[in-house]
Each structure stands twice: as C-alpha cells, then as structure tokens.
Image (spheres, rainbow, N blue to C red):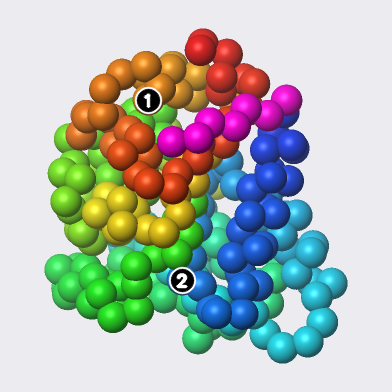
Amino acid sequence: MDIEIFSDYDALSERLADEILSYMSDPSGKLICLPAGDTPRRAYQILSAALSRRKGSPLPCTLIGLDEWVGMDKDTPGSCQYVMHEWLYKPASIRDEQIVEFNARNPDLTGECKKMDRFIAEHGPIDLAVLGIGINGHLGLNEPGTSFRQTSHVVDLTETTKRTAQKYFPEKVALEKGITLGLKHFLEAGRLILIASGKQKAKVIKRIIREDVSEQIPATIAKIHRNSTLLIDQDAASEL
Ligand code: PGA
C-alpha cells in the first residue's frame, strides 16, 4: 500500500479527481466504484467541472454503486445514492444506463445482493474502487469483523456508523441496516484507493498503518492489495 500525504483537503481532492477522471475517460470502458460520504465531495466538484467542459461522445465507463441504507433510494435526501446522483452523476451528465446500483427498497435484499454479485462476476472485476474510511475502519458498509471473503451483503450497522451517519441527513433518521459491496470485491479490484481527511480520522489512520492486517479493521485489506494507495491530508496523518 502506497501512502500519499497532502498538505490539505484541496490538494488531496485534486489528486483524487485526476485519477478518477483518467479511469472515467479511458476508452476501454472501465468499471468504477466510487463512495458517497463527505470525503470525496470536493473531488466530485472538480470532476463535475472538468466533465461539464468536455465535448464529444459520452464517457465509456460504468459506475457501480457502493452501498445504501436499507429503505432509501436516490430520492431520499442524504442517502448514498442521492449524494452520488446530486454531486457527481447529474453535474457530470452520467447517464442512467451507465449506473448499476442496489435497490435498497426491494423487500428481497438477498436477491439484490445476488444480482450485484452476478453483474460483477460477468463484467468485473472492478477496475477502480475508491473508498472512504469510517472512523471505525469500515469500508463501504463493511463493518469491523466482516470477512475479507465477503461479497455483497446486508449489514446490521454498528452504533458508531448509525451515530456518525446522522451528519448526512437533514433530520435525524433511524438507521438499522445497510446493503453493500463486499471486501472481496475491493480485494479483487485492479486498483484500490482509500481516502481520509480531517483530525477525526487520525486515530484510525494510525491503526491502519501501525497494526497488523485484520478483519477487525476492514481498511487494512489495502495492505494486502497489489495496487493500493492511501490518500490522506495532514490532519488525518497527524497521529503518525
Ligand atoms: P466520510 O465517510 O467520507 O463522510 O467521512 C466515510 C465513511 O464513514 O465511510
């Protein structure tokens, strides 16, 4: 795992936007998984600005949705899909047929997981997976203790995630379960980028770097991935 430390959030975001853009515009048509959450927000603004200036044929990439809170969809303000559509897909003119995501309102969530796993088996592996790191070390909604062999699954959210995720919503919401791609998908991705910004991530970044690879810290899978980079700003690196 390479580690790149940036002077600030803007510099990290520029670097991230650059690499995502090169995958999105690759003529071979890459399969790309990008996260919701606050960390990539600036990179998505940079990307959207760049893509809105772009002329010519539509981007050849496919965007695969990382995760969602069960019971929500892209019309729920604050949901993962809402964030992706509002911050990136709409401003960057990504068309619906380029987007593959869970239907977290489907009563048959197991069927949703199977469908996603089948899609990845047929069209994957994912070429680029970008993932935010939770303060408990989770990736997507793969909470601590999740097997590295796990594919798409439905998750009972930890108290930490339920509490921390309130920041995304305009009002307090009841969060109990999530649906997410699995750690196996990230391990098998051609390229893995983990991102973290801010002092609130400093403790978990120190643990990821200093501690052994363990299912108790899902983000440590980056240390056994063959082509992974951790992008952090000075604040997130402040306990190293
Ligand atoms: P954040 O979320 O980018 O909002 O910090 C990361 C996560 O908890 O997955």
Determine the image quadrant of residue 154.
bottom left
In the image, the segment drawn in magenta is 1-7
- State the residue in front, 144 or 188: 188
Q: Residue at x 46, y 54 (%)?
A: 191
Give whichever of discs 2 and 1 has the lower sequence position: 2
- Provide the secondary structure element on which disc 1 rests: helix
- Residue 112 is at least partly visible in this image: no
Q: Is residue 201 left or right of residue 66?
A: right
Residue 18 vs residue 20: left or right?
right
Residue that appears at 21% across and 50% down: 155
Residue 31, given in percent of the width and then of the height, sits at 46, 71
What amino acid type is highlighted by mark number 2?
A: Leu
Q: Quadrant of the N terminus?
A: top left
Residue 38 in the image: state x and y as whole percent. 57, 42
Tell me the tag on residue 168. none
Residue that appears at 50% across and 40% down: 229
- Residue 199's spot in the image, x, y percent? 57, 19
Which residue is denoted by mark 1 in the rendering?
208
> Cβ–Cβ below 8 Å for labels 2 and 1?
no
Residue receiving disc 2: 31
Kindly report the distance in space between the C-alpha atoms of the residues bearing marks 2 and 1: 27 Å
